[in-house]
Image (cartoon, coloured by chain):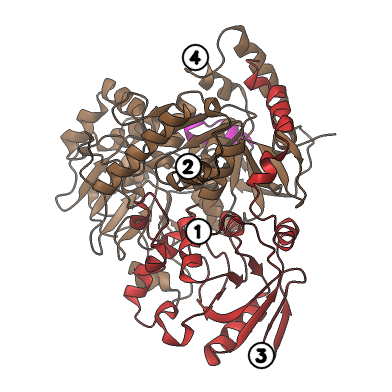
Amino acid sequence: MAETLFHKVWNAHAVRKLPSGQTQLFVGLHLIHEVTTPQAFDMVRQHGWRVAFPERTFATIDHIVPTRAQQRPFLDVMAEEMATSLERNCRDAGIPLWTPEQDEQGIVHVIGPELGLTQPGMTIACGDSHTSTHGALGAIAFGIGTSQVRDVLASQCLALDPLKVRRIDVTGSLKRGVYAKDVILTIIRRLGVQGGVGFAYEYGGPTIDAMTLDERMTICNMSIEGGARVGYVNPDDTTFAYLRGRPFAPQGTAFDRAVAWWRQIASDRNAAYDDRVSVDAARIEPTVTWGINPGQSVGVSEAIEGDPHDEAFAFMGFRPGARVTGTKIDVAFIGSCTNGRLSDLEEAARIVKGSRVARHVKALVVPGSKSVSRAAEARGLDRVFIDAGFEWRGAGCSMCLGMNPDKLVGQQTCASSSNRNFKGRQGSPTGRTLLMSPAMVAAAAIAGEVVDVRKVLEEVPA
Amino acid sequence: MSDQNLNITCIEGTGLPVRGHDIDTDRIMPARFLVAVSFDGLERHVFEDDRKADPSHPFDDPRYRGASILVVNANFGCGSSREHAPQGLARFGIRAIVGESFSDIFRGNAAMMGMPCFAAAHEAIEALQELVEQTPEATITADVASGEITAGPLRFTATLPPALRDAFVSGQWNPTAMLLDRFDEVRAVAARLPYLAGF
């Protein structure tokens, strides 16, 4: 019978039906970090359980890491305690951990794929909602809470109900200046921030097929912003080429055997879906959020529409009928698990090269991992950014979420390549976040206000 | 919060209405309170920024003091998977949530703590919110098995995902023991996975 990747992977990892009716699902890869695990390790200890599969568990420190001075101990005493707690827990359980002193450290959703830990056909869990990112390689990856982290530590399993699968076909070529970020923002705008509840999103079609893994990760990363806990792309030659040679990927002839299995695990051509949607990518323009959830976005040439009584208008200082272009910004942030990869930095660097950040703007570039940072520096991108007036920081989650020293202050407006524009998300209760592609952030940093990156690109050699 | 599994069949208490769609977990528990190694004290920070911005926030309204049933609108708990959000609500005294809909992750996290999230139609929720606002002392009764919600003259049926409903009723909502119960089967599945066997 023709099946989706979701069902094939689910069935391959289903242990049994629990008395409650939920499925006991084996987790092939458990990624952990400092924020959502200390309580889980405590619970495991209190019960006298042990970490069941330490060899399938990998840890990093990312959320609380300062990006300016990363030496230990961290200045924030609580952040340091979280780091030492994770170090102790990992040491006791025999779990590999990458701390900021190590070359492999970075945002958990950046390093999983880049180390080759994330592979097609796996079930993956991590105590972080952006775990959906790993679906870009054809894995089924669940963001989970701390009690579920406890379950995975103790049993390497989750108790879950299966999801329905919605196929999202993206066709048409992206115009210059339009990126994967604009595609996912458009999908969320159209299907709504609640549209994906109960669903896994399978992204496909010629536009997705033509995308790099970095681009697919941007798309899958924000599935959760559309309500879908899981998002994935079927593995293909692009996926296999990406994985070949990565440290934790199969090596030698094992890689060829792996590719054969990875091909089988992809959705069958005539698989049945619970829902289907198609999106014309050729009609998408650079997209910016104007509101307080990621579904509240507009194309740069459109006027903002909506109920004037919606609290988003007052909070963000917009009125119905207004445009996002021309909105003055105070901060520009390029980074995060959504858009902190090498290709994001390369595209942003192309735009800032030879220009200067507007005098009133504080601009940050935060690579998603140490590896991204090294690769960018090898290409001289750090110099391009620094010369333009950006701060070039160390790897971490940074200004995406207000859990480290990188925060908005007061009612600052931030052009951000991150994933959430919730009230208070970037660390100031009254801070305003405008989500957009890294190229759009770069253009806004230079102009000092939101501009249409397509106009900037007209001046930049292709 | 208790690690003891108990049968949860009926929740009774007064209500606390929080209006608005798409209330995300950053609002329920701002990220700065996640810089900690335990959940202790989170009850003090529930909706902290919203409450500072709005002194009449329902969480500070003395009429709702002692309430144990939160009444919310659509897509409650969207965004971050932080369990700190439902942990903070539970420690504040919330034992069940009745709303139009919930994010998948939030509802699952709440279930793992023995806190059912009942979903019902928009009109029913609006009526319940109005009733609680007008008569905060009204007792709300939420029956887990039937999904029946009653409060004063109001009576409607809400839903829980069937597996969660059965887990609450049978006292199996904290699944770790069950997941460890037949561990040989877990090892058997692991042994069959090509990527764990070196392909």
| Amino acid at circle 1 | Gly
Instruction: Decide if residue A256 is in sight here.
Output: yes
Amino acid type at circle 3 is Gly
Instruction: Check disc 3 and report the residue beneath it.
Output: B152
Secondary structure under badge 3?
loop
Chain designation of label 2? A
Residues at marks 3 and 2, CA–CA distance in whole angstroms: 44 Å
Separation (CA) of disc 4 from disc 1: 38 Å
Disc 3 and disc 2 on one polypeptide chain: no
Whether residue A234 is in magenta: the answer is no
The segment highlighted magenta reads: A205-216
Among the chains pictured, the one given red colouring is B
Q: Chain of mark 1?
A: A
Residue tagged 1: A295
Instruction: Say whether disc 4 or disc 2 marks the residue closer to the N-terminus.
Output: 2
Q: Earlier in the sequence, mark 1 or mark 2?
A: 2
Give the mark toward the camera: 4 or 2.
Answer: 2
The quadrant holding residue A1 is: top right
For label 2, the residue is: A41
Q: Residue furthest left?
A: A359
| Residue A252 spot, x, y in % from top left | 57, 7
Q: Please, what is the dominant secondary structure of the magenta stretch?
A: helix
Q: Which chain is brown?
A: A
